[in-house]
Amino acid sequence: MGSLMRSEEMALCQLFLQSESAYSCISELGELGVVQFRDLNPDVSSFLRKFVSEVRRCDEMERKLRYIEKEIKKDKIPVLDVGDNPDAPAPREMIDLEASFEKLENELREVNCNAEALKRNYLELTELKYILKKTQQFFDEHEHSLQADAHEALMQAEQILQPQALHLGFVAGVILWEKLPAFERMLWRACRGNVFLKQSVIDEALEDPVSGDAVNKCVFIVFFQGDQLKTRVRKICEGFRATLYPCPESPAERNEMSLGVMTRIEDLNTVLGQTNDHRHRVLVLAAKNIQNWFIKVKKIKAIYHTLNMFNLDVTQKCLIAECWCATSDLDKVHLAIQRGQENSGSTIPSILNRMATSRKPPTYHRTNKFTTVFQSLIDAYGISSYQEVNPASFSIITFPFLFSVMFGDFGHGFIMFLAGLWMVLRERQLQANKSDNEIWNMFFGGRYLILMMGAFSVYAGFVYNDIYSLSINIFGSSWRVPEGIYSFDGEVKDWLDRATLEPSPYHCVDQNVDNRTYVLNYSTASYLGSPYPFGIDPIWAIATNKLTFINSFKMKLSVILGVLHMMFGIWVGLLNHTFFQNTINILCEFIPQVLFLTCTFLYLVVEIFYKWITWSDRKPEFETLTGCSPNLLIGMINMYLFTKGEYNNVNVTIDGQTTSYTCSSGNPVFGETGELVQTFLVVVTVVCIPWLLVPKPFLLWRRGYTKKPTPRNIQTGQPEDEEEIIHHDQLQINDESGGETHEEEESIGDIVVHQAIHTIEFCLGCVSHTASYLRLWALSLAHGQLSEVLWSMVLRIGLSTNGHGGGRGYIGAAVLVVVFPFWAVLTIAILLAMEGLSAFLHTLRLHWVEFNSKFYKGEGYGFEPFTFEHLMDDTSAPE
């Protein structure tokens, strides 16, 4: 498990790097990814640092790469991600990369500019072609109308359509289809109806040369008389951004121009094809290297950004850096620096010194692909303090277990287990896809958690004997039908024989009541004397008091698990107190907390187990003493009210032998002796409250804790003024993310108030947190009831449908085929997705609030090493 239990021991180191080898050394450390650098120039503007010009050059290269990537996506050229991780280029290679990107960008811009000009010419020729074509159609329609019996209005239009006779002029052009209605209205109003407009829609969509979008346009021709109307029409066309083209008046000239336009269009098509082919070849070559280029540029930028955090010595030839590193990785850091020095060709060795400091180190937990998801759940609550016990190591078991208590169903758990197993087995293929779907990425990131929750839910389903709300009889029920009470054809039947036995009021034990005397005959007992080997007996699936029994069992189980979980959290706190050698917390917090929880709710857990063991059907006389069965709730209330019960003697006759039993209205579990024990527990509980409140502030005050502590070395524990340490002015600068050099001075009043809040929170929290664990029972009940509703109201319809005659089985099968998809969809959507999410959130709350609050501070800050690993996951800039 590595350092999952406690964070790694960290060391603050000082690096002395020669200017010519600093780039290579930082590159090797970035590939290693185990060093977190501190910013030694927090007050210096980003624009005034030494390597700001190199960072700007990297930004310019990223801009060019984004432009190239946009052009690649525009042509829908696939970019293959082969998973290469190229090394960071040397500083001298940066010039070659800049020249390559500059050349490629200029070439693409020139090609795009030429292509845009060609497309614009092509668009104009295409529009002119349609104008000549549509204009000829207008005049052809006019000639045909002369031969027909037209209306008088058409005869007036015929006079307008004779420009040679009436000396009419006309203009022809193209306009967007969306602007045509407004254009027509403007012409009519501005020219007072003295123009004649003909229009026709172009059949095919034309490509805009700038945006590349498809647009729909119309060809129009406007006839008018006089220069004044001509000027007005042209201004209106200009206002609506309509394109006007010259159109000859004679058919011969139009045909000649049309032939010329077609020839030029064919030539433009040839040139455009060659231009697009050349552009495509350039982009295909760029697409093969675009991912590696992005990685290289981002690595260069990350290196120079890190170098900007360093200080220069007085000679301006050496860079001084400070970094946090795990002590177990110091040898790796030494080797990485040596490799960087060899790659740079420098002869002056770099120096790595371990510094003494009183700073709070960052928290670093080594995780793998299995433990990462559990650590993420804890980090979302708060980063562990330095070398504090990490709850993630326990949540690997407790989280899926508590989830399964609420989600316990063999069938649903098995489906969840298969989903998690599929994601685990196809892990590499799914990771290679690099999906952008956040919901999918969230589920895939928690694949091992889903696998564990599904496996534990299968186990809980066995314990509950619940599979899609049904029970299975594996070992044989421990209950039988009492002889002489119910039989079928003279043969005693098993209670699980559903074909011959339905739930009925006969499912009980024969008993006669005579005042305070109970009579029980062993020959009528239906319990065989030995419990079901594992889990809940399947007989409860058909019992009339099923819900009462299941609720009682799960409610008590929730209290037991909750108290044990909280007690475990308090004992985990002892590990912290022992590790940090905090004797005051052990004496003034741990011991009273354990006693308080033991005397209150752990005693309730003991009562529950005692009642289960003692008051059971193994002793059938207790089954008849319903008035003597202890009520735990009333008993807890009487315990704190110091109420004593009234005792009565009850006689029980069994096979002619009479036995006397003592019962109490106060319902103590342990009788009169139990009342003395309960009185002692209440006294201890009351004593624990001032024990938590008073001694710790008093001892801290006596020890002078309120004075500012002397800084100590995190490696040796000795005062810094007693050691020879490496020190300079930057040592007094706080980390960006974390701790301060010295603790703030705290007054005795602040300590008392803080301890009072802590005491009240713990005492009240024991009550509220125990009640909070009842969510285990509530959600388990809701899950079971929803599952039973889906079974009885959906799937059972198909299984219970019978026809008449020879085809009765086929009718039931047909109905089952129809209802099964509904049942499956509702099961996955409601019981797996919604109920699973609800159980997950409640489990998360139980760990964050009820468990972590007993020992976990979470006041640390995370270790964020300088690494190139994240560059592989985000090689392109967001759009």
Image (cartoon, grey):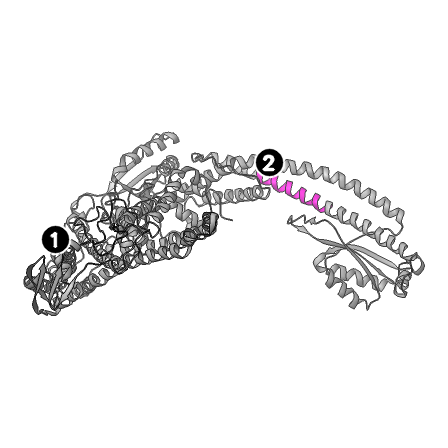
* Disc 2 crowd, CA 10 A, few/some/many (<14, 14-19, 20+): some
In which quarter of the view is residue 281 placed? Answer: top right
- Residue 7 drawn at (x, y percent): 25, 45
In which quarter of the view is residue 176 placed? Answer: bottom right
Q: Is residue 336 magenta?
A: no
Give whichever of discs 2 and 1 has the lower sequence position: 2
Give the number of the disc on residue 44: none
Q: Pointer 2: what residue?
A: 282
Tally of numbered tags: 2
* Disc 1 crowd, CA 10 A, few/some/many (<14, 14-19, 20+): few
The secondary element bearing badge 2 is classed as: helix
The part of the chain drawn in magenta is 103-121
Q: Name the foreground residue: 733 vs 367.
A: 367
- Residue 558 drawn at (x, y percent): 24, 56
Amino acid type indicated by mark 2? Val
Residue extending furthest front? 490
Q: Image point 65% across, 38% down: which residue?
A: 276
Give the number of the disc on residue 583: 1
